[in-house]
Amino acid sequence: MAKKKVNGEKDYLKDIDNYFGLSEVQLIEAYKYMLTTRLTDDRIETLIKQGKAGFLISGSGHEGIQVATAMAMRPGKDWFYTYYRDDALALALGLTVENIFQSTLGKATCPFTGGRQMPSHLGSKSLRMPIPSSPTGSQYLQAVGTALSCKFRNTDEIVYVSGGEGSTAEGEFYEAINWASREMLPVIFCIQNNKFAISVPVEHQHTGGSVYKLTAGFENLNRFQVDGTDFLQSYAVAKEAVRLAREGKGPSLIYADVVRLRSHSASDVQEKYRSKESLEEDLKNDPIIKLEKFLVEHNILSQDKIDEMKIEIANDILRIADEVFTQPNPEASTVEDFMYCPDDEQNKIEYEKTTPEGAPVVMVDAITHALHEEMEKNPDMVIYGEDIADGKGGVFTATKGLSTKFGSKRVFNSPLAEASIVGTAIGLSLTGLKPVVEIQFADYIFPAMMQIRDELVMYRYRSNNQFSCPVTIRAACGGYIGGGHYHSQNIEAIFAKCPGMYIAYPSNAADAKGLLKTAVNLNDPVLFLEHKFLYRQPYAKSPEPDADYYLPFGKAAIKRAGDDITIVAYGAMVEKGIRASKEMEKRGVGVEVIDLRTIVPLDSETILKSVKKTGKVIVVYEDSRFMGFGSEIVAQISEQAFEYLDAPIKRVAGLNVHVPFHPNLEKAALPQDDWVLKACEEIAAY
């Protein structure tokens, strides 16, 4: 078990007389980065008091470890997952004071988010610094995914990820440490311990008061505890961690003890919960004052030169802030831009150039074949999830044969941890790989909710189109299998509320194959829902499409034509609509059945065209009637086709209960054929 704690006996700390390989010029540069960051914070604080800015979350007291780590790594080559106090690291890597003010003032010129996010969310495509989010701890798994990609692509790139000590109370931090340690990944976890998570002291966060102690049991994890206010000691530790990662010797945890010289944010007043003595003690450990003293004592800079430098940098910052204040604000007309990949950037897929003419195939086999075909076409595609490798090949055998054919490097089992699955997939996708991950049952997707809602679907939008996450998530959903509460859910309504992600929900084998092949080629995230009851249903079989068959998202199918009633359905409900249509046809009533095929985008045009023709509509969906996705369809019809309606819109849906286990109870909870037929009879007679 590799453990390293800073002390004078370590080889990597013995070269202090030679500044651990840094030149005097580099030491002066380090001081400038730290000083510039501090004075920039000072100016932002003034702008807030003047009513010209609204927010500051400062890294004052963190500058030493941040600049040290930046100088030990390679901007534009390595990867950087920052958190909201990492301004000093960002400046040392190549971002500018102007960029900081553009972010602070939310300008259209902000190179990070274009004014879409609050200040302090810094990033850069060229610096390989993905735009971070506000939820603490969500960055760790993504960094591990990127480190996994570095190993997959056989590069010498390494990954930096940082956070405050408070963020390490999140379970995802430990999931990330576990994955990185198990796989010996080239990632450095830089935990900046300023001893307070807003107002909660570190001893209330962790047993023993330190996550450094708690991580002692992770094999292959190199651990360092360092005075993060001491620039040179921090640089020595960072340099060693970088060496270990670069040489394939596993991940490192740098636990840097720093100070928080300002309140948590501009909206916080730390004097309310910190003692005067505590604040005064922190001032004694100001990393800038420490480095100033070192530079003067070693005749690298004189005090006069330092004083002159402070005035010069402060004046530059004042000028830059004034210039940025006059730059344009974002235009309201751009608010919907970059929710999805712009059409001119989307992969050019030739849709439906062939027709399904192969031997009939069940849905689960069509899905398996789609994955095999796309893996052959795209060497950057990787597949993983719980139990997906051979010999299991997935609990429904949807991934059978894949790991045997393509090897364990491209197809492998993940831990039983849904946040880990999605979080690492994000990190992989940001490097250009195409991950297709499986959530074994849709019911178990919710541990990954933050990674999906706050990360995956927001990356493109929050980064102003700099970063995209083309992750495909496959999930088996739906009832009618006696699965009870935890194997029967439909989740499309919940995730349709996550703008930025496409959702497919096929009803038959051909559609499943064509849509899945399209999904893994899109430049945006896709939730691909597979109704497990349909996997081997004879009526869901269809002639199999060939390897060149791709089905567009947002194009519904008319399964049966009719002039009197419209049924809108998807998934397992399509067959129920078809059966009702056939029965009503015997009675002289023409029922048109529309299969949505995708939830997002929704083919509203086909729905409205049919409703305007028939004047009567039934929306059939398996999820609970209350707040199910069918309610959105009803709302759109009411808004856009009300004057064409000859009867109230009907909904046929599940009860607002948790799907129960016993067949009698399940049958009572989920839509049945006779429910749909009764709705047809009632609306026909209206």
Image: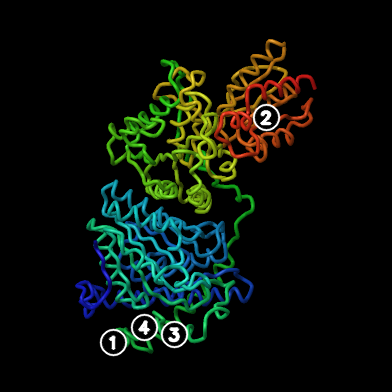
Q: Residues within 10 Å of mark 1 (few under 14, many from 20)?
A: few
Q: Amino acid at mark 1?
A: Asn
Q: Which residue is mark 4?
A: 290
Mark 4 or mark 1: which comes first in sequence? Answer: 4
State how many labels appear. 4
| 3D distance between C-alphas at marks 4 and 2 | 71 Å
Residue 151 drawn at (x, y percent): 28, 49
Q: Report whether 457 appears left or right of 590.
A: left
Which of the two discs, 4 and 1, sits closer to the camera?
A: 4
The correct choice, above or below, for 25 with respect to 70 in the image is: below
The correct choice, above or below, for 210 with respect to 296 in the image is: above
Mark 2 or mark 1: which comes first in sequence? Answer: 1
- Label 1 sits on a secondary structure element that is loop
Which of the two discs, 4 and 3, sits closer to the camera?
A: 3
| 3D distance between C-alphas at marks 4 and 3 | 14 Å
Q: Report whether 446 appears left or right of 566.
A: left
Q: Are the residues tagged 4 and 2 within 8 Å (C-beta)?
A: no
| 3D distance between C-alphas at marks 4 and 1 | 14 Å
Query: Which mark is drawn over residue 652?
Result: 2
Mark 2 or mark 3: which comes first in sequence? Answer: 3
Residue 389 drawn at (x, y percent): 33, 36
Query: Which mark is drawn over residue 281?
Result: 3
- Label 2 sits on a secondary structure element that is strand
Quadrant for residue 603, please give it.
Answer: top right
Query: Which mark is drawn over residue 299?
Result: 1
Q: Amino acid at mark 2?
A: Val
Q: Are the residues tagged 2 and 3 within 8 Å (C-beta)?
A: no
Mark 4 or mark 2: which comes first in sequence? Answer: 4
Q: Amino acid at mark 3?
A: Glu
Q: Are the residues tagged 4 and 3 within 8 Å (C-beta)?
A: no
